[in-house]
Image (cartoon, helix red, strand yellow):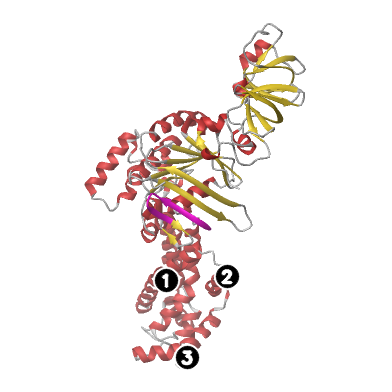
Amino acid sequence: MDDALALGFTKAFPGGPEISADLEIDTRSPRVTVLFGPSGTGKTTLLRIIAGLESPTTGFVRYRQETWADIARGIHISPQQRRVGFLFQDYALFPHLSVERNIAYGLHSSPRAEAARCVQGLLERFQLQGLAKRYPAQLSGGQKQRVALARTLALEPRVLLLDEPLSALDGPTREAVRGDLSGWLHTLGIPILIVTHDRTEALALGDDMAVMDEGRILQHGPVDEIFRQPANQSVAQVVGVETVVAGHLLEVADGMAKVVVGQTLLSASSDSLPRDQSAVFVCIRAEDVILVKGDEFAQASPRNRMPSVVKALIREGPMFRIHLDCGFPLSALLTRQACDELELKPGDSIIAMVKAPNVHLVPRDVRRSAKADSTETLE
Amino acid sequence: MDWQAISLSLRLSTMTTGILILIGLPLAWWLASTRWRVKFLVEAVIALPLVLPPTVLGFYILVAIGTRSPLGQAYEAITGSRLPFSFQGLLLASVLYSMPFAVQPFAAALSTVDRRLMEASYCLGVGRLATFFRVTLPMAWPGILSGIVLSFAHTVGEFGVVLMIGGNLRGITRTISVSIYDQVEALDYAAATKTSLLMLIFSFIVLAITYALQRKPVQVWMTR
């Protein structure tokens, strides 16, 4: 692709893990790509290499026709020349400069009047007018983030990189800022890469997602597709599909698959399943599990109805996570109200229902996914 | 009061401090940012004057700049004058002697500056040198100021090295501390008392100003 931000590099750390990145991001139809994965998998390093703050050990970084780094050819373009916007995790505002001077920092070579106009425009756009003379220490977390974003955008970057943009904020602020941030990002018209390990953040901010674990990009595609159809077991575990159990495929007919997990027979959709593959992982998200007491729903539509025993109830904020045994361990997520109405307690017998399309099958023992064209699995 | 010695001391200290800013800042910046494995050797060499008796340091410098040494001969060939027992020789010795008092605070201050601030500056298109002056130096300013004042005050107060290198030549190498020594030797206690008191007051004022300056301009962003 000629109009892509293309990464194909490895980065080795002495005594540490190796990070390898193989990713192409289209720069013509700018989308927000979330780099998702647990902490310490090299997501931030990947951003730093794109920005030019670090060099890869082997390989290249290309932006459209420009080569930003190519180890074999001895090319390393400095961060100053790349025009990449980088929003640091704790924003890295200059503490000795006021808000307006922070924003104007990179505009030192522009004519004074033009720089002032640009700063004024950004102050208005990010609702910072009253704060121009303040210092970073006098700002709230959300305000700091807006200043950092304005400072980065003053230079009209060609690519924007955000490292855990919400992690420096406290809970209630984070939710409010998340909405605003998503709105701003989608008006910028440049490709954006966001690093996060927070699932809600990934879903809220991203159009596309690249799942990273242990230094590798496991899958790259639209966010909902990745959550609904993880390419393999590692992706499923990273993105947090709560129930991942091994099963065997019995038959596929009319787009429906029959799998057996232990003694339990399940119906699943079969659209992402390769042929000649009987070993599968069965993935069920806790949100997709419906719990029913008694027999009154015998005529219900979900294909899968499993008699289960409640093992444990764990409170998670406003929700309850129910651990069930239905022949295999199954996890369900219920509101507190639903839990109260069902009068659930450990040891209760209950019917767990899951619609067939919500039972996802992932090939087992095969590292490459069936949809190889839409994924970036690295060996 | 030996005003000539006082003026000489001030001149020597000002020039020494100026030179230490010029060579000490890059050196400290290098020490603070290098990942070179044997940098501890460089640090140890710079810190030597802290532990060596001034006589030992003075003796080695004297040998190094003497007329038989390559350095001394080169200097003489270029300028036509000799380094030992001259103001220039004294200046060189003072720079070496006060080096740790400048470089150590400089390096400590520079290494506390968050690297991400510099990286943020690079990503905003600002070059390394400009970043040093626009971000690193302002952030490290309290420590830099300490280094400047300490090296100035230390040079004003030096004695042993001055005697070894400069001797006691009126108007050329007789600094304030040597002058006090002379006055005591001559049993002129009244003069010695006056000069000593002046030194004491001067030192106190300098240090008080330093601490005051360190607090005020940075207070806004230090109170996080």
User: Per the image, is B133 magenta?
Assistant: no
* Mark 1: secondary structure: helix
How far separated are the C-alphas under marks 1 and 2? Answer: 20 Å
Question: Where does the image place residue A362, in percent across and percent down from the top left?
Answer: 63, 33
State whether residue B113 appears in this view: no
Q: Which residues are magenta?
A: A56-68
Residue occupied by mark 2: B38
Quarter where residue B25 is shown: bottom left
**Are callouts 1 and 2 both on one chain?**
yes
> N-terminal of the two: label 3 or label 1?
1
Query: Label 1 neighbourhood size at 10 Å, few (<14), some (14-19), many (20+)?
Result: some
Tag 1–tag 2 contact (CB < 8 Å): no
Front residue of A36 and A20: A20
Can residue B53 be seen here?
yes
Which residue is tagged 1?
B23
- Amino acid found under the numbered disc labelled 2: Val
Main structural element of the magenta stretch: helix, strand or loop? strand
Identify residue type, mark 1.
Ile
Residue that badge 3 annotates: B69
Of pointers 3 and 2, the one earlier in the residue sequence: 2
Q: Chain of mark 3?
A: B
Helix, strand or loop for disc 2: loop
Name above or below for residue B179 compared with residue A154. below
Q: Is residue A61 magenta?
A: yes
Q: Chain of mark 2?
A: B
- Amino acid type assigned to the residue bearing label 3 in the image: Ser
Distance (Cα) linking label 3 and label 2: 28 Å
In this rendering, position of residue A199 left or right of residue A24: right
Q: Crowding at label 3, few (<14), some or many (≥20) Cα neighbours within 10 Å?
A: few
Give the spatial CA distance, label 3 vs label 1.
Answer: 24 Å
